[in-house]
Amino acid sequence: MAIIAIALFLMLVLIAVGVGLKKDVPVEESEDPVLHASGIYSIVRKSPREAVDRIKPSEEEIRKYLSSQIENIQRGALSQKECEQLIKRWNEAINQSVMTVELGDRSNVEFYFYEFSSGECSVCKEFISRGKFVTREEIFLHPQILPPFHLGCTCSILPHHGKEDLRDTTEMGMLPLFKGKAPPPLPDWKAINFTNVIRGASA
């Protein structure tokens, strides 16, 4: 009986020690938790900054390309000043798109639509029209759908809060950009919109 009692005592001690060790081991949180405390999917609400920087051409790459295009046969010389203007506009457009999405995430915006500062972009018109919209999830999965799409691009993305005037959204012909799960074709970033940006638009 004494041996059995001692054995039971030792078992209880081991169990108690095991429970204590489990309590002391910190539970590691996933680097990318599926849900925020608010219930919003964090994987969708992550800032697109890093993804955009990875997928869009860098300033160095753009500068190298433009240096090879200083002499444009059809439109005359592309000056160094105009090259710098294109690079400046590109960087500004990238920052604007990222900031728009980041601000939209704060108010749980789910849809964004495309707009053009000059009415129409000669390069984009074959790919994207004013009022086409995308979801936040599509932006997360395919960050390349954030403008700018090419050098001199006048396209921007705006949040749709659901409070916009119905007549305005109808006139814009708000239709989804995606026709399936795969992203649609987009302009080659090397295409240059001379008309609206370089040859007449204000800096």
Image (cartoon, grey):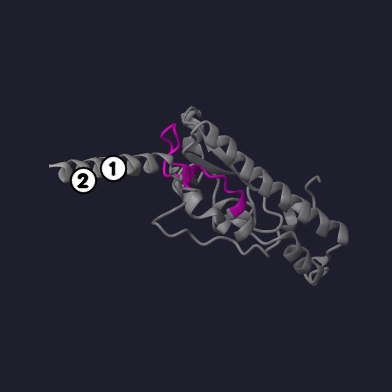
Q: Secondary structure at mark 1?
A: helix
Image quadrant in which you'd find residue 117: top right
Q: Secondary structure at mark 2?
A: helix
Residue 15, numbered label: 1
Numbered-mark total:
2
Residue 70, numbered label: none
Please check the rendered image and state whether residue 40 is part of the magenta-colored stretch, yes or no.
yes
Q: Which residues are magenta?
A: 32-50
Q: Nearer the viewer, residue 41 or 158?
A: 41
Q: What residue appears at the point 53 percent right and 42 percent down from the top-left corner?
A: 113
Left/right placement of residue 57 relative to residue 137 reads right
Q: Earlier in the sequence, mark 2 or mark 1?
A: 2
Q: Is residue 90 above or below residue 19?
A: below
Amino acid at dot 2: Ala
Q: Which residue is mark 2?
A: 7
- Disc 2 vs disc 1: which is toward the camera? 2
Q: Identify the main secondary structure in magenta.
A: loop
Q: Residues within 10 Å of mark 2 (few under 14, many from 20)?
A: few
Q: What residue appears at the point 43 percent right and 44 percent down from the top-left corner?
A: 25
Left/right placement of residue 71 relative to residue 188 reads right
